[in-house]
Amino acid sequence: MSAVMITRKVRKWEKLPGKNTFCCDGRVMMARQKGVFYLTLFLIVGTCALFFAFECPYLAVHLSPTIPVFAALLFLFVLAMLLRTSFSDPGVLPRALPEEASFIEMEIEAANGNVPAGQRPPPRIRNVEINNQIVKLKYCYTCKIFRPPRASHCSICDNCVDRFDHHCPWVGNCVGKRNYRYFYLFTLSLSLLTIYIFTFNIVHVVMRSVDNGFLNTLKETPGTVLEVLVCFFTLWSVVGLTGFHTYLISLNQTTNEDIKGSWSGKNRVQNPYSHKNMIKNCCEVLCGPTYPSVLDRRGLMQLSPVSEFSANDTDASPCSSSTDSSNSSKTLPSTKRAILCLHKPRPPPIRNNPTSDDLKASITDTAHTSPAHSQAEESSAAKTPPLATPETDAEASVAKSH
Ligand SMILES: [Zn+2]
Ligand SMILES: [Zn+2]
């Protein structure tokens, strides 16, 4: 038997499940549907180009040369914030590996005991205490993990995202723990840019109309009408959106939690993440620590060397994987088999450890899914802190149209 060693570098992003797309060798990460993102880019760049072409030369001479300079700086900032939001990992949580998932399943089944046929098994939840509030961690049937508090599964990207806010088609990405502040700065700066262009368009038309007349001005600068229309309709939505997110930030709340009413006071539930102080909440959301991506997208996967066997050899490797070898096997002759052993260093599958947000929180695992425990929990509900439900049973995705 002859064996030829074939090595192939595989980066982790190439094997990530979910519906994200990657480019620049995993450096750029977006949702699969990007059509609306291109429209956003086109509207911003197009409107600014018309402004620089038609209004800026006149305003720089007749009013102030700082007008185009400030517009250019604001435009670059808006673009930088948009690309930072769109091209980054929003805080995707890695799925459990098959062996980790089967271990969790075994644990859950052992805790449930024998559920009689025809009866629904108890819901898969675990409780953690955060700032004296009990928060339920729900099990994600797709990712096979207990989601951390505030995480939710985006059905468009098909991933669990930490501190999930919403999926934004305008930026072509989820908005979550790692890109929320850039998303907010994008909406804030875009509001300012829209107001700025709209105002100076009006000023330009008024100044020129004094000399040339209104109709002649519109004929000389045909881009003005288009700019005013785009800015007028953008103003309402973008300024409204910025106001809404300012309100959410002041409460340290996400769009997802706001829509579901997670902390609306039902069942005496209060938001355990709020500092009860608007300034502190704003500082935490906008100036708090940045979090590294846990996906390690550009990390190399540890692949065992691919061996070529003769046709009558048997598969002796316990690590053979039909799914993972699907891509590689296309490049090999049909009579030869590629066996890949994928060993990814991963964090533990049950992520009920506190995030940095929750460092103050003491976590007690009061789970549980066994009927005996459930009954005990129900009977002691009056004594224990109120139950918070950050997620509904349905896989959550707030596809928000701004
Ligand atoms: Zn999930
Ligand atoms: Zn998404």
Image (spheres, rainbow, N blue to C red):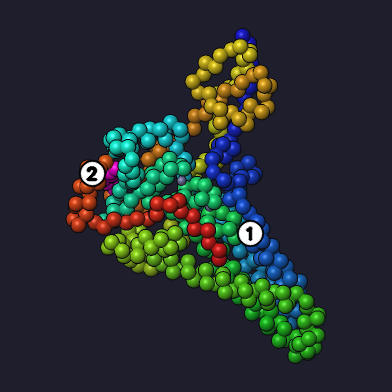
As drawn, the label of residue 9 is: none
Q: Quadrant of residue 23?
A: top right
Image quarter where the C terminus lies is bottom right
Local crowd size for mark 2, using a 10 Å CA cut-off: few (<14), some (14–19), many (≥20): some
> Is 334 situated left or right of 357 in this image?
right
Image point 75% across, 90% down: which residue? 210
Range of residues picked out in magenta: 363-369
Depicted 36 relative to depicted 301: above or below = below
Q: Position of residue 309 (x, y in %)?
A: 62, 15
| Amino acid at circle 1 | Val
Q: Main secondary structure of the magenta part?
A: loop
Depicted 246 relative to depicted 159: above or below = below
Q: Quick one: SS at disc 1? A: helix
Depicted 201 relative to depicted 320: above or below = below
> Is 65 situated left or right of 21 in this image?
right
Numbered-mark total: 2
Image point 68% across, 83% down: which residue? 203
Disc 2 target residue:
373
Question: Which residue is at the front of the view, 151 or 122?
Answer: 122
Give the residue at the far top of this rendering. 1
Q: Position of residue 231 (x, y in %)?
A: 64, 74
Image point 64% across, 19% down: which residue? 336
Q: Nearer the viewer, mark 1 or mark 2?
A: 2
N-terminal-most mark, 1 or 2: 1
Disc 1 target residue:
36
Depicted 228 relative to depicted 394: above or below = below
Image quarter where the N terminus lies is top right
